[in-house]
Amino acid sequence: MRTPLKAAAAVAASALALTTLTACGGDSASGSGGGKVKIMVGGLDKVIYLPAMLTERLGYFKAEGLDVELLTEPAGVQAETALVSGDVQGTVGFYDHTLDLQVKGKQVESVVQFSQAPGEVEIVSNEAAGDLTSAKDFKGRKLGVTGIGSSTDFLTKYLAVSSGVKTSEFTPVAVGAGQTFISAMEQGSIQGGMTTDPTVATILDKGLGKVLIDMRTPEGSQQALGGLYPSSSLYMQTEWVNGHKETVQKLANAFVKTLRWMSTHSAAEIAAKMPSDYAQGGGQELYVKAIESTLPMFTKDGVMPEDGPETVERVLKAFNPNLQNAEVDLAKTYTTEFVKSAG
């Protein structure tokens, strides 16, 4: 549990980040290869987005001559909004937002694909575990998601619909991640929900809940979603990418170096590079365990997994009325141009 002092510090830091974002929203990388790049992350301390901070901690941004500022929002949908509004040049969030935005008239593409599985876990409280044994039991439940319109919201709806439960038959509740998610479960505001490590590891360690559906591995993604599900990525507005190719290539170089580094180092070695407060009060040993559980989701080269975009399209079209009757040009939702040229 965070102390009041730590909680106050976290709030202050968040407010400062947002103030900085608002004040500097008009800035962007100048020319094709330099300037400051602001990247909004849908939760910097989430293990699924670990490559963002790890790249900074390893010094790879600076090695590429980049001035990168990492900002954070608790949910991917808020990070998406910051990108579309032009407040940041890039977002580290789920690839599925690129499809959702395309049918809304926004051209956004994944330029580095961090993962091949969602890294998400549907977890249920101990009190509800007896009756909530599969997605078929979502009916009538209040289920936590990071935010309405977030990827956790998307995936929860798919799991429900694919199990015969209508999206109108359960209630998604925006509870964020970390301590806010844990508190909602402890207070009974939600009976279950979708979240990531280190929140999952903390809940299990405290004996507050049980894993219902585990999508932290390619095998788990295959079982729950019928295929690999590319999720965490660096995505950017296509127009900005085309106008700043040298900068984007440097970003790809830095992130691909990080993914390669992760593939040859242990969870303990990775954890040792991260800020100490990312353990969310669970201690270093629990944080290492959280990283170890999630590591299988990451790619080693930043390349979009084969057939991954088709899986994402199928999942979204199962419940999203905006996509059900829309034609999605998947080729425009990602590019491998930069990762395949990464040194």
Image (spheres, grey):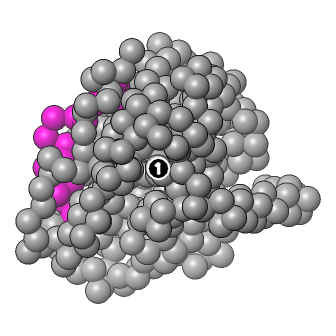
Count of marks placed on residues = 1
In this image, 249 relative to 14: left or right?
A: left
In this view, the residue in front, 243 or 202, is: 243
* Quadrant of the snapshot with the C terminus: top left
Q: Residues within 10 Å of mark 1 (few under 14, many from 20)?
A: many
Q: Quadrant of residue 170?
A: bottom left
Q: Position of residue 166 (x, y in %)?
A: 23, 80
Above-or-below relation of 169 to 190: below
Residue 287 x/y as whole percent:
64, 36
Tell me the residue at 47%/49% (across/down). 90
Q: In this view of the protein, can residue 338 be seen by the observer?
A: yes
Which region of the structure is painted magenta?
A: 296-316
In this rendering, would 117 be left or right of 270? left
Q: Position of residue 251 (x, y in %)?
A: 46, 32
Q: 249 or 324: nearer the eye?
A: 249
* Left or right of 220 on screen, residue 179: right
In the displayed image of the protein, which residue is found farthest to the right?
5
Does residue 100 sit above or below 301 in this rendering?
below
Taking the magenta stretch, the answer to whether it contains residue 32 is no
Is residue 297 visible to the viewer in this orientation of the structure?
A: no
Asked if the stretch drawn in magenta spans residue 301, the answer is: yes
Residue at the image point whose x is 58% and y is 79% from the top: 189
Q: Position of residue 242 (x, y in %)?
A: 31, 44
Which residue is drawn at the image coordinates 41% and 31% (left, top)?
A: 246
Q: Tag 1, which secondary structure? A: strand
Amino acid type, callout 1: Gly
Residue at the image position 8 percent from the left and 74 percent from the top: 325
- According to the picture, the residue beneath numbered tag 1 turns out to be 90
